[in-house]
Each structure stands twice: as C-alpha cells, then as structure tokens.
Image (cartoon, helix red, strand yellow):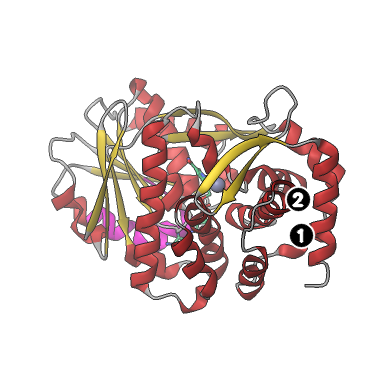
C-alpha cells in the first residue's frame, strides 16, 4: 500500500492506494463514528457495495443509498433525496459518509456531506481512473440545469481510499477517459513521464504502471491545490486542455463523449496554440498518434464549429470579463495562462480540424 498526504487549510488527509483496501476498511477508518452512510451508484453497487458494507460491519451501523449511474444523478433532485435519507437515518455530527464510485458520486456525496448539519466527515473511495483527479482537492458540486458544477463548495474529505482492484471492472471508454486527466498531469509536471506515456498503449497497461501513474497524478494535483486551494492562481493550471473540453461537452451534450476524452482532445488544441502562436516545441505529432492509437474520439473536431466553440468558451464560468484565457505550455512541465484573441482561436482551431480530418 502506498500513501500521499494532502495538506489543506482545514486539515491534512491521507490518500491510500493499494489492492483490496475495500475489504479492510475497519483497519483504515478511525473508530468512533456513530453511523456510516455509503453513497454509491447503481453500477458500482453491484460490484463493490457488499464488500464495503461487510468490512465496515464492526466499525458502526452501516447504511447505504444508491443513485442511478450517470452524470444526470449529480442533480438537485438526487441531492435532496440524499439529504432526506440522512435525516431519516438520523445521521448526526459524528456520522460518516463514504462516497463509493467515480467522480460523479464523489462530487454528489461530498456536497451532501459538506452541507448536511453544516458539514460532516466524508471519505472518498474512488473507483474510476478519472477520480484520481476528482477525489483530491476538495471541490464538490452538483449540476444546475443551466450548467455543470454551478452549485458546490470546497470541502475536503478526511481520507481517500483507492482500491486498485476496483479499477479492473472499468470499461475501456472509462480507462481512456481517466487517462485524459493522467496525461494532463504528466504534461503539467514531468517531460520524461509524458514521453513514456506517449509511447504506450492503454490496452497494454500493467496494474503496476497504472498504480504508479495514478499515484503521480495525485501528487501533481495535491501539490498544486496545496499551494492554491481556492483557485486564485496556479490551480488554474489544472484547467490545461479544459477550455475547449468544456465547450465540446456543452456543444455535443453531456454523455456523448466522456469528460476525460474531451480533455484529451482539448490538450491537442493546447499543443497547437502553444507551438504555433507561442513558439513552443511540444510533441504534437507524437500526441496525435497516441490519441489515435488509443481510440480517442478526435473526429469530434470535425463536428464542431470554431465560431460556436468560441461563444461557448465565453460562457464558461472560468472566463473572466469575456476574455478567453488559455493555459498553455512553454514546454512540458512549464504552464502559463494567456489571453488569446478570438480570431486567432478560430483560425487555429480550423487549422487543427483540417489536420485531423480523415484520421
Ligand atoms: N471535483 C473535482 O475536482 C472534479 C474533477 C474532475 C471531474 N469531476 C467530476 O467527475 C465526474 C466524472 O467522473 P467519472 O468519469 O469518474 O464519472 P462517473 O462517476 O459517472 O463514472 C463513469 C461510469 O463508470 C461507472 N463506474 C464507476 N466505477 C466503476 C468500476 N469500478 N467498474 C465499472 N464501472 C464503474 C459509473 O457507474 C459510470 O457509469 C464529473 O461529474 C466531473 O464533473 C470533478
Ligand atoms: Zn477535468
């Protein structure tokens, strides 16, 4: 088992990564909770809920709440249902919520924990690769019909418990999605790691490689959020690839492609802008080949309109005063934020679309 400690303004917490942790929760969770509510989704329930409940049986009375799998459960309706359940079960200030699932469950259950009784303890038990990102950093939220993550708070878990065995049941598309954020963390932090990833094929990943990549991704995320918990400065770097990704997700409708796949496509535009406008020499060709080899949906670039994308980018909540800010790289591991003119953006998006058409 490996561990990383994350420092936050409210408390420090540990991220534990290892195989089979879900079967030994009694040993890693502090005692003294009056009751535990495990919140999960309908897919993860079938695989792992029973193991988690059994391993907690001696710690405290354990209850569960299950929401349908999928992003649409990160809603005000499900949030209200979960609060009803907390009240009905008489959870108190010494109760614990466990978020067992991917980023959707982490965000939803974390937001419930952050608001019920003005905040009770919660633990993240991520079960997707993408959730290596979402389970660290304390951002929790639900969606509003008008936009993603519009209602939320900063609220850190008391622990993150990552059982690597749970990753084994992930479908290929979710592995791809998770690696969109992993490669982002590599681009932000370490050229050697990035080049190693670019040589690889996701279908041939070993469990040890995966564990190593997740640990490193968590370290990158943790070190950035520790320095800038509330996104006043360098936390913005974590938006690498996300300006276009959010616009694509909004344009195509959520669920058409996964978040991490959209980020992976967004990183391609980031490279193009960094190289063509700012003279960087990022490995654009290697990255394009990696995307194709791993079946990322770069063909979405042929279905979008640069002008419409720019309009969507202006609506993004990270856009300040109508100016479109991008995170770019001087070189691998050296990010910066810069404002890009709309016409340049349209031009380079069109060029990129021409380059990838037919691939
Ligand atoms: N808070 C943050 O900092 C942050 C960062 C990035 C993303 N997010 C949020 O995370 C969410 C996306 O997370 P996600 O990609 O993990 O999505 P998700 O939680 O919806 O999981 C994706 C799919 O995989 C299934 N699944 C989960 N674990 C599984 C397992 N072990 N085996 C088989 N199937 C499994 C789920 O049921 C779901 O159908 C979005 O809501 C996004 O806004 C939050
Ligand atoms: Zn993301």
* x then y, percent, for residue 323: 74, 28
Q: Residues within 10 Å of mark 1 (few under 14, many from 20)?
A: some
Q: Main secondary structure of the magenta part?
A: helix
User: Does residue 324 appear left or right of residue 38 in this picture?
Assistant: right
> Looking at the image, is mark 1 or mark 2 nearer the viewer?
1
User: Does residue 304 appear left or right of residue 164 in this picture?
Assistant: right
Say which quadrant the N terminus sits in.
bottom left
User: Does residue 311 appear left or right of residue 261 in this picture?
Assistant: right
User: What separation in Å lies between label 1 and label 2 (alpha carbons)?
Assistant: 9 Å
* x then y, percent, for residue 246: 67, 44
The span shown in magenta is 39-54
Residue for point 50% across, 29% down: 233
Residue 308 at least partly seen:
no
Q: Residues within 10 Å of mark 2 (few under 14, many from 20)?
A: few
Upstream in sequence: badge 1 or badge 2: 2
Location of mark 1 (residue):
300
Marker disc for residue 93: none
Q: Is residue 28 above or below residue 207?
A: above
Location of mark 2 (residue):
252
User: Does residue 174 appear left or right of residue 166 in this picture?
Assistant: right
Residue 239 at least partly seen:
yes
* x then y, percent, for residue 262: 65, 54
Q: Are marks 1 and 2 in contact (CB under 8 Å)?
A: yes
Residue for point 51% across, 73% down: 202
* x then y, percent, for residue 18: 26, 61
Q: Is residue 182 above or below residue 227?
A: below
């Amino acid at each position: 088992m490996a561990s990383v400690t994350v420092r936050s303004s409210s408390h420090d917490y540990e991220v534990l990564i290892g195989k089979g942790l879900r079967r030994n929760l009694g040993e890693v969770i502090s005692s003294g909770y009056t009751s535990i509510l495990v919140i999960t989704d309908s897919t993860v329930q079938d695989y792992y809920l029973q193991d988690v409940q059994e391993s907690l049986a001696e710690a405290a009375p354990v209850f569960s709440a299950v929401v349908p799998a999928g992003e649409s459960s990160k809603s005000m309706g499900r949030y209200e249902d979960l609060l009803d359940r907390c009240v009905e079960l008489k959870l108190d200030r010494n109760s614990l919520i466990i978020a067992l699932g991917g980023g959707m469950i982490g965000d939803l259950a974390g937001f419930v924990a952050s608001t019920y009784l003005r905040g009770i303890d919660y633990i993240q038990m991520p079960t997707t690769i993408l959730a290596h990102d979402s389970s660290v950093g304390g951002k929790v939220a639900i969606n509003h019909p008008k936009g993603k993550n519009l209602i939320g708070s900063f609220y850190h878990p008391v622990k993150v418990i990552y059982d690597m065995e749970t990753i084994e049941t992930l479908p290929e598309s979710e592995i791809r999605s998770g690696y969109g954020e992993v490669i982002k963390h590599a681009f932000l932090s370490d050229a050697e790691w990035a080049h190693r990833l670019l040589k690889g094929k996701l279908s041939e990943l070993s469990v040890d490689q995966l564990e190593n990549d997740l640990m490193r991704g968590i370290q990158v995320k943790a070190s950035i959020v520790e320095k800038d918990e509330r996104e006043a400065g360098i936390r913005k770097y974590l938006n690498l690839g996300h300006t276009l990704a959010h616009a694509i997700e909004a344009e195509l409708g959520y669920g058409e492609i996964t978040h991490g796949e959209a980020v992976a496509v967004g990183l391609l535009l980031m490279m193009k802008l960094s190289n063509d406008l700012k003279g960087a020499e990022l490995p654009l060709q290697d990255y394009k080949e990696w995307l194709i080899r791993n079946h990322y949906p770069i063909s979405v670039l042929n279905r979008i309109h640069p002008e419409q994308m720019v309009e969507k980018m202006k609506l993004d909540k990270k856009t300040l005063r109508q100016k479109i800010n991008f995170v770019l790289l001087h070189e691998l591991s050296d990010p910066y934020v810069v404002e890009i003119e709309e016409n340049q953006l349209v031009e380079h998006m069109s060029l990129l679309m021409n380059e990838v058409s037919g691939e």
